[in-house]
Amino acid sequence: MDRILIRGGAPLNGSVHVAGAKNAALPLMAASLLTDQTLSLSNIPHLADITTLANLLSQHGVEIAMNGNAPNGGHAGRVLSLTAERIASTTAPYDLVRKMRASVLVLGPLLARCGEATVSLPGGCAIGSRPVDLHLKGLTQLGAEIEVDRGNILAKAAGRLVGTRIILPQVSVGATENILMAATLAEGETILENAAREPEVTDLAVCLQAMGAQIDGVGTDTLRITGVEALHGAEHPVLADRVEAGTYAIAAAITGGTLELEGARIEQLEALADVLRAAGTTFEARNGGIFVSRSNQELVGVDVMTEPFPGFPTDLQAQTMALLTTANGASMVTETIFENRFMHVPELRRMGANINLHGSSAMVRGVERLTGAPVMASDLRASASLVLAGLVADGETIVNRVYHLDRGYERLEQKLSEVGAQVERIEDRP
Ligand code: UD1
């Protein structure tokens, strides 16, 4: 398994091009199942998770083509064309679903288009049990009959799904996306209340509108969807990745450097902006992107609590904790979205961080310096936090199990090297 070697100490300076958002691209790709015409998605990031979903979709019968140039080895200029003219199979098998939980996003579209779907139940993962009960309850309210048998979700609808009023008891990005996609082809109106407002949900809604869906309230917590008989093809650019942008912003802050994040959208990162500014960082919109700098300011502790958008994103919690380990003073980091999202804490402690866990909160007391150590990545964002810690630690840090990073960060070590980090991938040759 590949590892990443980091020699800490160099402040980052320069500009980083932010890729398309993984968490927007995945539901957008699943939306291709809703129409027999071609959906063309540009600004697709070059990531392992994209390939995993492409494999699942082609198994359902979707024809997939990648066109255009790939600047800098990324896929920014590339267009992924997906045509689900004929659905060859409505079954999403365990072998593919277990690789990535987001595979469950094929459930709503397959059910709405074909009246049936069998999707392997995604298991737990390093950050908690992560049930899909809200997805299933919402689709049941739309008229589907759903049972879970021997690890499979078996869903059927007699005729078209039927619109209704659904109130999500808890904000869920994936459940909102699955219900939204299914409702676009249902008969009549669906009102989805307490819907997730994450920018990735909004990007999906905008694309569905371009495909002919009738959706009101886009960007709010109440989506009103009037079902149509069929959707058509469309072209849609995937929005910029706010988690990637946020991770590089934190990289600038932690190293006391200055970065321009090309293509990043400040309105999607206001909660991070508040935290970074309070911690002593300049964070502002500039040249259509974001400018982040902490060249002369002292890093100070600040409290952080994760919440659904527009609150502070759970996907930036681990990286922010890495930042706070060397801040002056104490910080309280509270995780309210996932039950077990502190897997990075023991690893950061191995690097000298002073962190105490109390239930869903972590008390971080700033230390003078971190020291490099071999550490183990447990999930995508935890891995990113260890890389960030390595950027300021004394000596060498080796992050093992890098495949987690490859799921969500396009060419991480290359992008970091380009702005002055001493980072290299050690490939494991058999
Ligand atoms: C998505 C993102 C993930 C991000 C998360 C929260 C993708 C591919 N992934 O994950 O990166 O961290 O949003 O912003 O977009 N829940 C239930 N029952 C359900 C569904 C969710 O109890 O049926 C709970 C979850 O366990 C969690 C909370 O609701 O505690 C939020 O999860 P959700 O918003 O659904 O996360 P995902 O869509 O899986």
Image: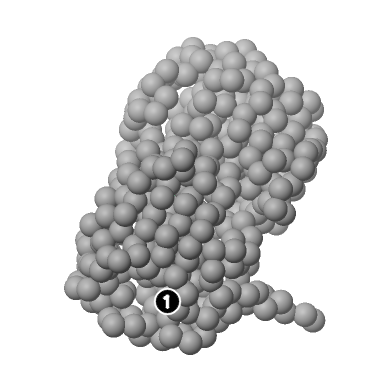
What amino acid is labelled 1 in the image?
Val
Taking the image as shown, residue 308 lies to the left or right of residue 84, namely left
Residue at (44% x, 70% y) in the render = 11
Up-down relation of residue 40 to residue 121 (above or below):
above
Which residue is at the front of the view, 182 or 136?
182
Q: Is residue 236 above or below residue 164?
A: below
Give the residue at x 57% y 26%. Answer: 207
Q: Which residue is mark 1?
A: 392
Cβ of mark 1 under 8 Å from ligand 1: the answer is: no
**Dot 1: element:** helix
Q: Position of residue 408 (x, y in %)?
A: 57, 56
Asked whether, in this view, residue 88 is left or right of residue 117, the answer is: right
Does any portion of residue 32 appear in the rendered image?
A: yes
Quadrant assignment for the N terminus:
bottom right
Relative image position of residue 263 (x, y in whole percent):
52, 42
The residue lying toward the viewer, choosing from 248 and 183, is: 248
Q: Residue at x 79, y 38 (%)?
A: 67
